Image: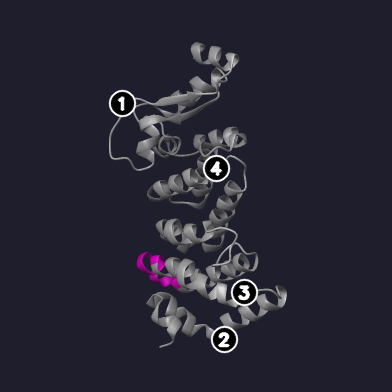
């Protein structure tokens, strides 16, 4: 057993051993395309990010471990080549995503690894690169919603709603349209609304009067994991006179 195999899961070690020639060829190709490619950084990311994915997928869909790892391996090569993953990365967001959040979506990753990993990785980078966006809120929201998301389309929609809630105000209309297409319980959870109301009631009232708002308070706290119940939904309104009058009318 090699040193690398000794500190990674059996799931990843088995794939690396069985596909050694193919994977080595992919690394060689990456080094050709990116002369500054850091193989040590890539090896380090395999032991954290890729291993977390391999292990989680092997636990829920063992028959999908091989194709998932191969797809994730290629994505990892690109991320490391662009200094977005590994010890020398610009920040730790990709590693935190792959280690802490992607495994919570293991079933979905196993079904559509390229799209799911690409979607999540691109999304966290986009949020982090947006001034004043709260990337920690996005990460926590995506983690909390994992058990309720069962399709790539819903994952994309939840990601957009969480981006809106994390401060990307220009996502508002798109986020609301995404919630419209979701099962009602999922939409209410995603926006942090009180489950006693219907999604359409919440949306129609605010949209009819053009109110600009965010859900906050205990409703939002429960969505993010606070162990309590609530009978109300708190709103934070955009503070300008016209929006205030619209809220009063609503």
Residue 38 is labelled as 3
Residue at the disc numbered 4: 160
* Circle nearer the N terminus (4, 3): 3
* Circle nearer the N terminus (3, 1): 3
- Over which residues does the magenta segment extend? 56-65
Q: CA distance from mark 4 to mark 1?
A: 26 Å
Residue 21 is labelled as 2
Q: CA distance from mark 1 to mark 2?
A: 59 Å
For the residue labelled by badge 1, is the local secondary structure a helix, a strand or a loop? Answer: loop
> Badge 1: how crowded within 10 Å, few (<14), some, or many (20+)?
few
Residue at the disc numbered 1: 231
* Circle nearer the N terminus (1, 2): 2
> Badge 2: how crowded within 10 Å, few (<14), some, or many (20+)?
few
> Badge 4: how crowded within 10 Å, few (<14), some, or many (20+)?
many
* Residue at image point 64% right, 68% down: 81
Q: Is 17 situated above or below 90?
A: below
Query: For residue 163, which quarter of the picture?
Result: top right
Q: CA distance from mark 3 to mark 1?
A: 53 Å
Which is in the foreground here, disc 3 or disc 2? 3
For the residue labelled by badge 2, is the local secondary structure a helix, a strand or a loop? Answer: helix
Q: Is 172 situated above or below 38?
A: above
* Circle nearer the N terminus (4, 1): 4
Q: CA distance from mark 2 to mark 4?
A: 39 Å
* Circle nearer the N terminus (3, 2): 2
For the N terminus, the quadrant is bottom left
Q: CB of mark 3 within 8 Å of CB of mark 2? A: no
Q: Could you say where residue 223 lies in the image, as x and y percent from the top left?
A: 38, 39
Q: CA distance from mark 4 to mark 3?
A: 33 Å
Query: For residue 118, which quarter of the picture?
Result: bottom right
For the residue labelled by badge 3, is the local secondary structure a helix, a strand or a loop? Answer: loop
Left or right placement of residue 230 versus residue 104 in this view: left
């Amino acid at each position: 057993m090699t040193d690398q195999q000794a500190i990674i899961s059996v799931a990843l070690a088995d794939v690396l051993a069985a596909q050694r020639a193919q994977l080595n060829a992919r690394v060689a190709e990456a080094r050709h395309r990116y002369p500054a490619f850091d193989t040590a950084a890539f090896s380090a990311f395999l032991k954290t990010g890729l291993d977390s994915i391999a292990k989680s997928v092997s636990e829920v869909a063992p028959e999908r471990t091989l194709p998932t790892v191969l797809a994730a391996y290629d994505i990892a090569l690109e991320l490391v080549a662009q200094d977005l993953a590994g010890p020398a990365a610009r920040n730790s967001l990709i590693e935190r995503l792959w280690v802490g959040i992607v495994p919570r979506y293991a079933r979905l990753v196993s079904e559509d690894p390229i799209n799911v990993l690409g979607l999540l990785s691109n999304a966290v980078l986009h949020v982090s690169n947006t001034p004043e966006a709260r990337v920690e809120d996005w990460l926590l929201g995506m983690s909390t919603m994992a058990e309720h998301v069962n399709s790539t389309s819903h994952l994309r929609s939840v990601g957009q709603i969480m981006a809106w809630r994390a401060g990307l105000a220009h996502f508002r209309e798109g986020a609301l349209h995404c919630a419209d297409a979701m099962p009602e319980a999922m939409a209410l959870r995603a926006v942090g609304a009180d489950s006693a109301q219907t999604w359409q009631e919440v949306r129609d009232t605010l949209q009819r009067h053009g109110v600009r708002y965010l859900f906050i308070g205990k409703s939002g706290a429960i969505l993010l994991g606070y162990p309590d119940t609530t009978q109300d939904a708190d709103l934070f309104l955009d503070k300008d006179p016209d929006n205030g009058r619209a809220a009063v009318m609503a």
